[in-house]
């Protein structure tokens, strides 16, 4: 199988078997060993390639073990520390990785719970493992930008110099992306002041800052919506679309309901992109301007004519497993798990059929 197919196969296995896994040892057998073997390409049954329970005595600490040591040409290249699936990964879980990293030849270490993999090296100080990973991979939410870097860690392509040279850029790009996502949804004073000072000529008082906090967030959401729409237009450029299919994107909005205040609701980038995917699908059968979204604390709703009695679907993205909720003729919702936003396209016919019920 191709590299991506092997990743998708393991992703499907995690989604199916993950809830039944209750221990760290079961996590290693069910998910981590297949990752080492199938994805990275190392023979987990050959101790010259993969050594489980690797022992490395350090000073007065004797008999401590690292879960896996991956070797190439007789030297340790990668150290792996495992936790139970579902357990959060914190840097304090990596104490053994820190200790072993500087006394072995390894330049790469991995902290994982079988679903999320965090990759570390020694960018900040030689032979000392960094506190922050240079790469993070979630097998239930694959990032296409991470896959070429992951391939560099495979047995057939392993090149430690190439990995280390790219690690610095990967580390800081990843951190910047997280910071941008945070600022776009909840901008801090510095971020607001940066933009306010460029478009507002008066003195930036507290009242002005409060005003521009709302405006900055709204502008960021609209900008991202425009980018998503442009991406969809480009993807569909070869298709024959109705005349209204290229209509501009309405500014995304969060409309509070009786039980939901806008201050408590955080509209995410995934929800906005999911909205535009649904819109791109159903605009083939209904005017795009009639497709509206409403965000709530429990779900992200997509409606026809901004009417609660005409739900098109719901996006349940406020958890690690994403779901799309579809409605039947009786308006009963059924949730379907999805691993990526692109899988929404697989429900195109159901979404169009829902629209047809209201017309």
Image: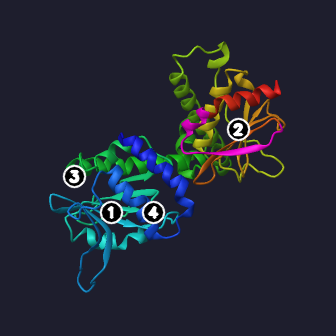
N-terminal of the two: label 3 or label 2?
Answer: 3
For label 2, the residue is 253
The quadrant in which residue 221 appears is top right
Q: Position of residue 343 (x, y in %)?
A: 56, 37
N-terminal of the two: label 4 or label 1?
Answer: 4
Of discs 4 and 1, which sits in the foreground? 4
The quadrant in which residue 28 appears is bottom left
In the picture, the disc for residue 130 is: 1
Q: Circle 2: is it few (<14), some (14-19), or many (20+) Cα within 10 Å?
A: some
Tell me if residue 43 comes above or below residue 323 in the rendering.
below
For label 3, the residue is 160
Question: Is residue 158 toward the left or the right of residue 231 in the image?
Answer: left
Question: Is residue 269 toward the left or the right of residue 97 in the image?
Answer: right
Per the model, the C-alpha gap separating discs 3 and 4 is: 24 Å
For label 4, the residue is 113
Per the model, the C-alpha gap separating discs 1 and 2 is: 40 Å
Secondary structure at badge 4 equals loop
């Amino acid at each position: 199988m191709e590299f991506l197919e092997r990743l998708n196969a393991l992703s499907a296995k995690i989604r199916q078997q993950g809830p039944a896994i209750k221990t760290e040892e079961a996590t290693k057998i069910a998910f981590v060993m297949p990752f080492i073997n199938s994805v990275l390409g190392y023979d987990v049954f050959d101790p010259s390639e993969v050594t489980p329970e690797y022992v490395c005595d350090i000073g007065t600490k004797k008999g401590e073990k690292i879960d896996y040591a991956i070797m190439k040409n007789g030297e340790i290249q990668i150290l792996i520390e495992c936790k139970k699936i579902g357990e959060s990964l914190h840097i304090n879980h990596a104490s053994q990785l820190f200790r072993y990293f500087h006394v072995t030849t390894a330049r790469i270490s991995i902290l994982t719970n079988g679903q999320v993999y965090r990759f570390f090296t020694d960018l900040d100080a030689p032979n000392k493992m960094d506190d922050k990973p240079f790469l993070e991979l979630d097998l239930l939410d694959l990032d296409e930008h991470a896959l070429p870097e992951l391939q560099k860690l495979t047995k057939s392509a392993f090149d430690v110099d190439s990995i280390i040279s790219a690690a610095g850029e990967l580390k800081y790009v990843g951190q910047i992306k997280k910071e941008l996502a945070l600022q776009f949804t909840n901008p801090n004073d510095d971020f607001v002041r940066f933009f306010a000072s460029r478009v507002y000529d008066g003195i930036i008082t507290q009242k002005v800052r409060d005003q521009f906090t709302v405006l900055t967030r709204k502008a960021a959401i609209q900008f991202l919506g425009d980018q998503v729409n442009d991406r969809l237009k480009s993807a569909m450029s070869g298709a024959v679309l109705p005349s209204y299919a290229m209509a501009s994107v309405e500014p995304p909005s969060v409309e509070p309901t009786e039980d939901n205040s806008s201050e408590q609701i955080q509209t995410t980038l995934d929800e906005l992109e999911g909205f535009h995917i649904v819109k791109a699908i159903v605009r083939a059968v209904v005017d795009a301007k009639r497709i509206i979204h409403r965000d709530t604390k429990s779900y992200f709703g997509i409606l026809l004519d901004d009417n609660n009695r005409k739900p098109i679907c719901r996006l349940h993205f406020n958890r690690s497993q994403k779901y799309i909720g579809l409605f039947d003729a009786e308006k009963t919702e059924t949730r379907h798990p999805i691993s990526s936003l692109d899988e929404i396209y697989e429900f195109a016919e159901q979404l169009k059929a829902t629209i047809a019920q209201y017309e």
